[in-house]
Image: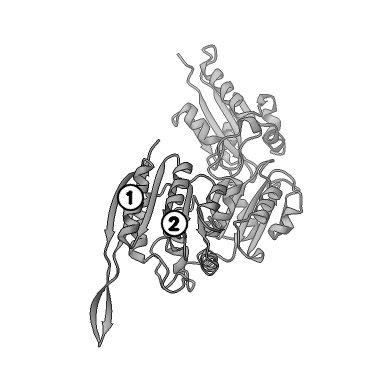
Amino acid sequence: MMALSKIYIIGIGYKPIEKKARAIILGSNIILASGRLFDVFMMYDEFEAVKDKVKVINKVDQTMDFIRAEMADHRIPSQIITLLASGDPMFFGIGRRAVNEFGKDTVEIIPDLSCIQLAFSKIKETWDDALLMSLHGGPDPAKRRRLEYELKDLPLLLSKHSKIAILTDRENNPTSIARHIVSSAHFDQRPAALKIYVCEKLGYADEELKEGTPQDIAAMSFSEPNVVIIQNIDIPKKNEKNSVKQDICFGLTEREILHSRGLITKDEVRAVVIHKLRLPHYGVLWDVGAGSGSVSVEVSRVQPGLRVFSVEKDEEQQKNITENKLRFNATNMEVIKGSAPEVLKDLPPPDRVFIGGSGGNLEKIVSSIAGALSSGVVVITAVTLETLQSAIQLLQNKGFDVDISEVSISRSKMTAGKQHIRALNPVFVIRGEIKR
């Protein structure tokens, strides 16, 4: 039968060890620490009394294996195992792994401050409104754990959050973070709107705070360990004027979207189109014949994890799309200038396609899409019966399952002080789905 042991995970690094944690450390049979945390623990008063009990293991997997072996050793009666952790073990730390491995009844956690909590106190900013993320994938590149976010996600995240705090590592360090922001083709923020803080060696005697623009930080090097805080002053607060455009993720109106001569997918039709597309969280969408880019903008805001390519040949409309992209901070959206299907061959394969305009090339466009789309949905809008029939036939010939909706819209209008209802031209929405 497994020996009954208790595992204590105690955070250190930023403040003196509290009374309860001190008693546990002094009464422990084994104290485990990484090499870095061993150096930190040496600075504590408790170190001298227990230094012979400390075992240094640098790899998390080996630490878990060691604890498992100790707990399974029948020759050893119940014992106290202490695992030293950095800061708060449950903040992107080893606490989660230990609880999953050994269970909540076996593990007890006594946290220190988190490095992020301390970093925000250093820069004197609140952190209850910040996005907290980790780019710390582990020391071994071959075994790096999959992270929720990666460097490539930062431009999009910075368009949505006024503050981002990042746990770094040697690969995803402050310099590489700043360089990625500076070089990102999809990030259109004013450089002066971003401020980066780097807190080096928090808790050490030689801790240091550095700050600057992304360009400044990209040219610097930093001591480890460190954390990064990025502040975007262009993100409006909830009570600021015009913040409604940032708060609304779906439901933009024709009056808000820049367009020319009424050439825009009507609000109600746009809602149906986006519903029919059944957008995934991640992937690629082509908006072919994008016009003003109204569908692209709405899609980019509804699903910020999608990459949206707005294909348009008309120069005036290209300017409208670009302005709308900037106006609504649609950083995951890219304007593709040129005619379809010629420009489609250079785009990443799509998961979803919307065709709002074909310029008379519908057959060639559908053929190109069918060759690029391994599975997914195509939605086409048509205002004439000829385009409707052509779209149905082309999609069916390429193996798509097709369904059709007719969207009839009537809107109210004040005439002589009274509300009257006026019908708009009906629009056909053709949806094709293919599974291979």
Percent x, y for residue 361?
45, 55
Label at residue 79: none
Q: Quadrant of the C terminus?
A: top left
Separation of residues labelled 2 and 1 (CA atoms): 24 Å
Q: Is residue 77 left or right of residue 201?
A: left
- Residue 221 can be seen, yes or no: yes
Percent position (x, y) of residue 317?
A: 51, 67
Number of marks in the image?
A: 2
- The image's mark for residue 392 is 1
* Residue occupying image coordinates x 27% and y 82%: 414
Q: Residues within 10 Å of mark 1 (few under 14, many from 20)?
A: some
Where, quadrant-wise, is the N terminus in this rendering? top left
**Looking at numbered disc 2 in the image, what kind of residue is underneath it?**
Val
Name the residue rendered at 39%, 69% in the picture.
Answer: 253
Rendering colour mode:
one colour
Residue located 59% across and 39% down the image: 11
Above or below, 322 against 27 in this view is: below
- Which residue is more in the foreground, 363 or 271? 363
In what element is the residue under mark 2?
Answer: helix
* Nearer to the camera, 402 or 108: 402
Locate residue 137: give its quadrant. top right
Closer to the camera, 165 or 155? 155
SS of the residue under disc 1:
helix
Q: Which amino acid does the dot numbered 1 rest on?
A: Ile
Q: Is residue 161 visible?
A: no
Label drawn at residue 299: 2
Of all residues shown, which one is farthest toward the top? 75
Mark closest to the chain's N terminus, 2 or 1:
2
| Relative horizontal placement of residue 10, taking residue 281 as reference (left or right) | right
Residue extending farthest to the bottom is 416
